[in-house]
Amino acid sequence: MEVMVLLIFFSLIVAIGFLLAFIWALKKGQFDDMLTPSIRMLFNENGKEDNNKIGER
């Protein structure tokens, strides 16, 4: 029974640590990027025309 109490205690410490890390990341602006890397490749950043467009000549 003592082992279960220790496991619950350590899991609460780990959970509080993750919560504090999440709050710290929020305050540092980690999640403020509106143009995420997953959609950044969809935009033409280099200013060149895309020659692979279908139907536009």
Image (spheres, rainbow, N blue to C red):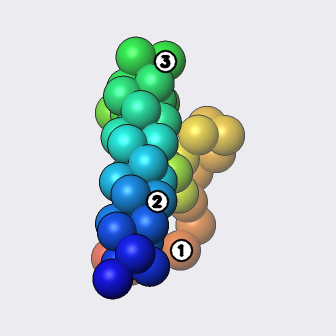
Distance between the alpha carbons at the discs numbered 2 and 3: 27 Å
Observer-nearest residue: 43 or 20? 20
Q: Which residue is mark 2?
A: 10
**Residue 24 location, quadrant:** top left
Q: Residues within 10 Å of mark 2 (few under 14, many from 20)?
A: few
Q: Amino acid at mark 1?
A: Asn
Task: Please give the name of the residue rendered at 36% of the width and 28% of the height, measured from the top-left corner.
Answer: 23
Would you say 48 lies left or right of 11 here?
right
Q: Which mark is residue 21?
A: none
Task: Please give the name of the residue rendered at 48% of the width and 36% of the height, measured from the top-left corner.
Answer: 21
Say which element carries label 1: loop
Observer-nearest residue: 54 or 21? 21
**Residue 29 location, quadrant:** top left
- First of labels 1, 2 by sequence position: 2
Label 3 with label 1: CB-CB less than 8 Å: no
Looking at the rendered image, the disc whose residue lies closer to the viewer, 2 or 3, is 2
**Residue 11 location, quadrant:** bottom left
| Position in image of residue 31 (x %, y %) | 38, 34
Distance between the alpha carbons at the discs numbered 3 and 1: 40 Å
Position of the N terminus, as image quadrant, is bottom left
| Position in image of residue 30 (x %, y %) | 47, 30
Label 1 with label 2: CB-CB less than 8 Å: no
Looking at the rendered image, the disc whose residue lies closer to the viewer, 3 or 1, is 3
Q: Which mark is residue 52?
A: 1
Report the label total.
3
Against 42, residue 19 (above or below) is above
- First of labels 2, 3 by sequence position: 2
Q: Which mark is residue 28?
A: 3
